[in-house]
């Protein structure tokens, strides 16, 4: 979102922008360097201007993923803001070292209450706030409204209530509202347990060594007129980021009995922690995570068990760059209106459809094991680089009415095995150790039988191109091999 601070800085640097707007951006930097936005190996005012140009017009001054990561130097993890440009200028002048952090007290001197911290105690049907908070919080029964950026440490149990982030003027207060869950249990029976009504950025940090629970009740959320709102258990109107502590041992359990799990009208980022999401409303096919503009998983462990879609972006993209993602979905496992981009980490997913995108599914790294019951991943928009992929179109299992194979019939290639998330008819496997030109064997991890394909029942799976399709794959396959050739038991897992 645009804010007044960015506009002021952009005006101040307009002359510099004219000088650097025509400079070519390098395609690839040798290594990550905080502040090097134009990827030329240096930190100069040109990098600050590149940030401001991007904020003013993201389409005209688009940045690569690497450039965006380099640019996020102030309050790292909260996306790019005008303060990143200020921090880069300070670094160029030798005043600070990047990345710059509020927590170290190095934020802009004109930012009010930049080290502000509040303790919030949830006590059943009431909320107690400790600290000098009269200006920045309001408590009404079991609802807490946060009206200023800062740190809010939340613990205890709220039987039926809400934490609402509502910044009146996000242009004047454009900094991050930081929620720290430290053993918190919040049930939102009549409205979202956590709601971001208005804020430039909100982050939710799951404190190390704590287990936290967010849930709803048995009825749909409705407004004053009795109309369903469509809100999720965690609902955000602006950007929201989920983080872990230094050790990433904090756990967030989200149980959505009636509503969807997490919904954001802008961007969702997951940068750590252990996040478990379960939606149980089969009638409405409730989904796990929906970031309208985008969903990005950078690190952490995310497990989604949803009656509807697992992870989706209803208008934009879904990206996995790190961490581990496991999805069991009643509908699409991963769905994007634009692209699905997987460049690292691990993703294990199963649904009626696996990876569903409109403009492209791009795999450039990571372990990807995706199954589907209805349709295979579209080959015409599937692009795989740096590794190879095998698409397995299976014969019907005569033992099951729908022809699908039970998830117990998971497959292993060579000595590497994966546990599938649900029953399947189609399989996509891609990993860094799968190479074009190499031949692999597949084994049914339940029976030990050698998997076959094609009319001649071949048990050799040779990868002839980046994406190789195998027809008539039979997971029942041939008789089990001798014990000395079976996959090791400890290798049969989804890591």
Image: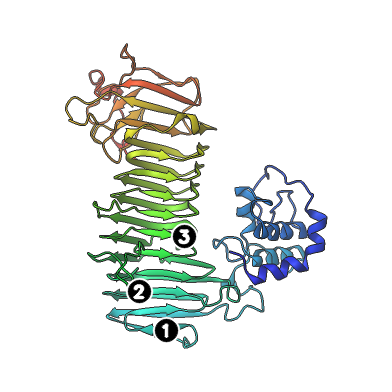
Instruction: Report the side of 14 relative to 112 (left or right).
Output: right
Which residue is painted at 31% across and 19% down in the image? 452
Of mark 2 and mark 1, the one earlier in the sequence is: 1
Comparing marks 2 and 3, which lies closer to the viewer?
A: 3
Q: Rounded to the nearest whole Å, what is the CA distance between mark 2 and mark 1?
A: 12 Å
Relative to 27, is 199 above or below?
Answer: below
Task: Say whether residue 236 is left or right of residue 47.
Answer: left
Q: Secondary structure at mark 3?
A: loop
Give the labeled residue for mark 2.
Answer: 162
Q: Where is residue 270 drawn, in percent x and y?
A: 46, 56
Which quarter of the figure is the C terminus placed in? top left
* First in residue order: circle 1 vs circle 3: 1
- Point 57% across, 62% down: residue: 76
Real-space Cα distance between discs 2 and 3? 19 Å
Q: Look at the numbered disc 1 and give the secondary structure of its residue.
A: strand
Dot 2 falls on a residue whose secondary structure is strand
Q: Position of residue 7 (x, y in %)?
A: 69, 68
Residue 433's label in the rendered image is none
- Separation (CA) of disc 1 from disc 3: 25 Å
Residue density around tag 3, few if under 14, some if 14–19, many if 20 or more, within 10 Å: some
Question: Of tags 1 and 3, which is closer to the observer?
Answer: 3
Residue at image position (71%, 71%) is 8
Res 15 seen here: yes
- Taking depth in this image into account, of 23 and 420 the one nearest to the observer is 23
Name the mark on residue 265: 3
Label pair 2/1, CB-CB below 8 angstroms: no
Residue wearing tag 1? 138
User: Which is nearer the N-term, disc 2 or disc 3?
Assistant: 2
Residue 117 pos. (x, y %): 49, 79
Crowd rating for badge 2 (residues with CA inside 10 Å; few <14, some 14–19, many 20+):
many
């Amino acid at each position: 979102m645009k804010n007044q601070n960015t506009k002021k800085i952009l005006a101040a640097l307009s002359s510099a922008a004219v000088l650097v707007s025509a400079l070519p951006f390098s395609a690839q930097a040798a290594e990550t360097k905080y502040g090097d936005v134009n990827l030329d190996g240096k930190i100069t005012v040109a990098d600050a201007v590149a940030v401001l140009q991007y904020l003013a017009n993201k389409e005209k001054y688009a940045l690569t993923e690497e450039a965006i990561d380099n640019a996020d130097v102030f309050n790292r993890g909260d996306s790019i803001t005008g303060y990143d440009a200020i921090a880069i200028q300070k670094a160029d002048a030798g005043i600070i070292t990047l990345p710059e952090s509020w927590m170290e007290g190095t934020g802009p001197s004109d930012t009010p209450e930049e080290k502000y911290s509040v303790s919030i105690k949830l006590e059943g049907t009431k909320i107690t706030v400790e600290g000098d908070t009269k200006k920045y919080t309001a408590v009404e029964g079991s609802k807490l409204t946060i009206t200023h950026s800062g740190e809010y440490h939340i613990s205890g149990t709220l039987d039926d209530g809400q934490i609402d982030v509502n910044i009146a003027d996000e242009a004047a207060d454009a900094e991050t509202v930081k929620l720290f869950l430290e053993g918190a249990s919040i049930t939102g029976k009549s409205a979202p347990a956590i709601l971001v009504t208005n804020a430039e950025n909100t982050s939710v940090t799951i404190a190390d060594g704590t287990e936290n629970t967010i849930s709803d009740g048995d009825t749909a959320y409705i407004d004053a007129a009795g109309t369903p709102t469509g809100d999720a258990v965690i609902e955000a109107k602006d950007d929201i980021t989920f983080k872990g502590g230094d050790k990433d041992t904090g756990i967030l359990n989200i149980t959505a009995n009636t509503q969807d799990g997490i919904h954001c009208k802008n961007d969702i980022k997951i940068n750590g922690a252990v996040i478990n999401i379960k939606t149980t409303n089969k009638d409405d096919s409730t989904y796990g995570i929906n970031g309208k503009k985008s969903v990005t998983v950078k690190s952490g462990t995310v497990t989604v068990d949803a009656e509807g879609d697992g992870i989706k972006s209803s208008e934009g993209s879904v990206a996995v760059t790190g961490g581990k993602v496991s999805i069991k979905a009643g509908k699409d496992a991963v769905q994007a209106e634009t692209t699905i981009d997987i460049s690292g980490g691990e993703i294990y997913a199963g649904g009626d459809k696996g990876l569903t995108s409109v403009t492209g599914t791009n795999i450039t790294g990571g372990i990807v094991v995706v199954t589907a019951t209805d349709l295979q991943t579209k080959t015409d928009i599937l692009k795989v680089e740096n590794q190879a992929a095998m698409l397995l179109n299976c014969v019907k299992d005569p033992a099951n009415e729908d022809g699908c194979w039970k998830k117990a019939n998971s497959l292993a290639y060579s000595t590497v095995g994966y546990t599938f998330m649900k029953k399947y008819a189609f399989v996509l496997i891609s990993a860094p150790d799968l190479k074009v030109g190499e031949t692999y064997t597949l084994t049914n991890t339940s029976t030990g039988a050698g998997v076959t394909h094609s009319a001649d029942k071949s048990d050799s799976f040779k990868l002839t191109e980046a994406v190789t399709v195998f027809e008539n794959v039979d997971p029942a396959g041939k008789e089990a091999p001798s014990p000395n050739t079976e996959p090791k038991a400890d290798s049969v897992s989804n890591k």
